[in-house]
Amino acid sequence: MSLATIQALVVDLLRDDAGRVSTTERDRAIGLAVAQYSRDLPRAVVEDVVADGTAILPLPTAWVAGRSVVAALEYPIGRWPPILLDAVFVGVANTPAGQEIRLVSAIGPGQTVRVTIQIPHVLDATTDTLPSADHEPVASYAAGLLLDQLAALYATDGDSTIQADSVDHRAKSDIYRSLAKAARQRYFDALGIDPKRQRPAGVVVNLALPDSQGRDRLTHPERYR
């Protein structure tokens, strides 16, 4: 499905018979909807990179600076079940030259590491990385953004000195605001997302540390950690 089809879906959902939403505004809303979808369900890309003998791995070619996240590192590759490096041993650091993937310890030169990263989706005239089943929810989110704009437009539109006209515009604003909320909820329901959820800011790691006197801990000894 191309961008043109998503555009048509937004028009169908919006039903802007008065033509108050421009094509530029429509396309901007679609871009914002794709960005939201990329945050909720980012695109997973798997690439193999070759270690150079240091604790820094080359960035995958699909890496998007400031937007990509390392989801998994498999090393050595080809085992079953796959051997994945624990997240506490992997990090992405910012440097004057750009971002880099750092490990706690070096991997031998020439060794292959399988990197799974998460990157934003792309939707344009030639590329569409959205799953076909999620096109309609993304169009619904874009329509919700535009309906919010129409609600704001009618809330401030009209001559307040004419009472009937003022009441009519307030009613339209309320209707569009309600339709916008329903359109966004349609997006969340279709993707099974709780809009009130909170993303974790970090992870909890149980470090195998001794007590203050250097002895093993009584309630959770090292052999159980």
Image: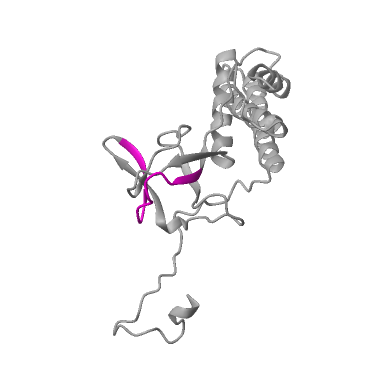
- Above or below, comparing residue 1 to residue 192 in the picture: above
Q: Nearer the viewer, residue 109 or 129?
A: 109
The image quarter in which residue 154 lies: top right
- Residue 157, x across and y down, in percent: 57, 19
The image quarter in which residue 207 lies: bottom left
Identify the residue at horizontal 39%, vertical 39% (top origin). 58
- Above or below, comparing residue 172 to residue 20 in the picture: below
Q: Is residue 205 left or right of residue 29?
A: left
Identify the residue at horizontal 43%, vertical 87% (top origin). 218
Residue 160 in view, yes or no:
no
- Residue 132, x across and y down, in percent: 71, 30
The image quarter in which residue 165 lies: top right
The magenta span reads 98-115
Q: How is the image coloured?
A: one colour
Q: Nearer the viewer, residue 141 or 90?
A: 90
- Above or below, comparing residue 208 to residue 86 in the picture: below
